[in-house]
Image (tube, helix red, strand yellow):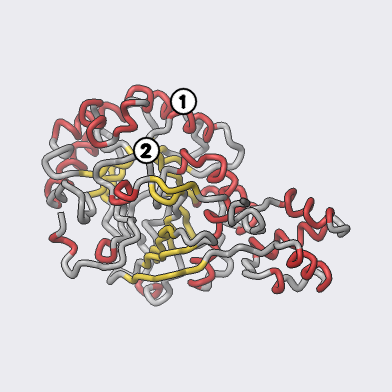
């Protein structure tokens, strides 16, 4: 039985689309027209491709081809303007994608807040970040993440990854997306455990949809071989590494993936990563009250960063049911940041976006019922 996305044109690159139309007896430039319509124009049905002849459109339909756009099943809107989308695919499975108006800052994934003037406050699309999922569920099993409670269901195809972005951009009526949309591959799943589909999606988003790679960031829990693979890519996002502990004993407990690729291997891969001009690595550190937020943990983290062109994003735990950790106080977070800063490590505190609708970092679990007072959930 064919996977439900096999006849979905969304996810095919230019060469593949050209081969399809040529097999139907059409000239190769029809492939370019189809590519432009699917990705740049973000059409949702073959019938909408006005540059193609009616005969070709009917031929594609007869052969079972469709664009294969995903459906927006539900939307949850936060008090801060963040929107959590529940997006469904052809097989009925769903993932979550998050729209953060005015983003997490001017640089994709830098974890700072936007400094836009107040007159843009009624134009949430002036700058935004889309948080994209790469898998349905996750197998990495980070102990502080709600997505881990789902387990691993399946990988997303390249088309399903791109389709999330197209669906959200269409819903937000963003045309064109180039200079005002950041992408962070930090949603459900570990992108590097679905590497081929993830990197194909990146190429399609750059060459097709038109979002520059400089406005993309991918986060990994530490799949070391794939860090080297990413560094060798001609087109690639910036890299963020989820650290969350500065010694192996603690990281083993919080992130079981550390038992396969420990901190020494991870930092070696980070040092070997080929950074472009003005580019920095990002290390993400989720702070858990009384677990990994002590001054000695900050000092250990600063020592790991020594000699790296890197910055650290500090994230106070976003709570949720089934997570047996507490959120540290603001004072604890600022103390941790101060120790890093004094050691010469650029450190930023990421303010939560969409925490009240389970849209913040580590909260994506297809939650339908939202507690009235989420801050009390530990």
Left or right placement of residue 272 versus residue 283 in this view: right
The image shows residue 98, relative to residue 346, as above or below, that is below
Q: Earlier in the sequence, mark 2 or mark 1?
A: 2
Q: Quadrant of residue 290?
A: top left
Q: What element carries label 1?
A: helix
Could you classify mark 2 by the number of other residues whose Cα lies within 10 Å: few (under 14), some (14-19), or many (20 or more)? many
Does residue 206 appear in the picture of this structure?
no
Camera-nearest residue between 69 and 152: 152
Camera-nearest residue between 218 and 71: 71
Across and down, in percent, residue 114 comes to: 36, 60
Task: Report the number of discs.
Answer: 2
Across and down, in percent, residue 315 comes to: 26, 48
Tell me the residue that label 2 is attached to. 221
Across and down, in percent, residue 120 comes to: 40, 73
Could you classify mark 1 by the number of other residues whose Cα lies within 10 Å: few (under 14), some (14-19), or many (20 or more)? few
Q: Residues at badges 2 and 1 in contact (C-beta under 8 Å)? A: no
The image shows residue 45, relative to residue 288, as above or below, that is below
- Comparing marks 2 and 1, which lies closer to the viewer? 2
Tell me the residue that label 1 is attached to. 272
In the current view of this chain or complex, which residue is farthest to the front?
1
Camera-nearest residue between 329 and 214: 329
Residue drawn at the location 31% of the way across and 53% of the way down: 361
Does residue 359 appear in the picture of this structure?
yes
Left or right placement of residue 164 versus residue 141 in this view: right
Residue drawn at the location 59% of the way across and 42% of the way down: 235
Left or right placement of residue 310 versus residue 10 in this view: left
- Inter-mark Cα distance, 2 to 1: 17 Å
The image shows residue 321, relative to residue 126, as above or below, that is above
Q: Quadrant of residue 292?
A: top left
Residue drawn at the location 21% of the way across and 30% of the way down: 250
């Amino acid at each position: 039985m064919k996977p439900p996305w096999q006849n979905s044109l969304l996810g095919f690159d230019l060469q593949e689309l050209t081969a399809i139309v040529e097999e139907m007896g059409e000239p190769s430039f029809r492939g370019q027209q189809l590519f432009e319509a699917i990705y740049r124009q973000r059409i949702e049905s073959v019938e909408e491709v006005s540059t193609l002849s009616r005969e070709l459109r009917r031929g594609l339909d007869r052969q079972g081809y469709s664009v294969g756009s995903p459906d927006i099943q539900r939307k949850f809107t936060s008090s801060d303007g963040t929107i959590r989308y529940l997006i469904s695919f052809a097989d009925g499975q769903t993932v979550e994608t998050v729209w953060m108006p005015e983003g997490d800052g001017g640089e994709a994934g830098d974890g700072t807040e936007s400094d836009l003037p107040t007159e843009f406050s009624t134009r949430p699309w002036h700058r935004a970040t889309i948080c994209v999922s790469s898998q349905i569920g996750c197998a990495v099993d980070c102990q502080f993440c709600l997505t881990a409670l789902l387990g691993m269901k399946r990988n997303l195809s390249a088309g399903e990854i791109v389709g999330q972005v197209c669906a959200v951009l269409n819903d937000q009526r963003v045309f064109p997306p180039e200079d005002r949309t950041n992408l962070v591959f930090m949603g459900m799943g570990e992108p590097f455990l679905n590497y081929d589909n993830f990197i194909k999606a990146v190429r399609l988003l750059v060459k097709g949809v038109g979002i520059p790679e400089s406005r993309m960031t991918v986060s990994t829990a530490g799949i070391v071989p794939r860090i080297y693979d990413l560094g060798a890519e001609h087109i690639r996002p910036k890299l963020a590494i989820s650290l969350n502990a500065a010694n192996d004993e603690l990281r083993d407990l919080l992130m079981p993936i550390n038992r396969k690729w420990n901190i020494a291997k991870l930092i070696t891969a980070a040092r070997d990563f080929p950074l472009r001009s003005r580019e920095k690595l990002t290390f993400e550190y989720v702070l858990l009250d009384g677990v990994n937020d002590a001054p000695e943990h900050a000092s250990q983290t600063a020592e790991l960063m020594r000699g790296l062109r890197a910055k650290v994003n500090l994230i106070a735990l976003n709570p949720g049911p089934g997570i047996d950790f507490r959120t540290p106080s603001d004072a604890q977070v600022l103390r941790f940041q101060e120790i890093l800063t004094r050691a010469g490590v650029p450190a930023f505190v990421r303010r939560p976006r969409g925490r009240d609708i389970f849209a913040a970092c580590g909260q994506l679990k297809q939650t339908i019922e939202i507690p009235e007072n989420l801050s009390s959930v530990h």
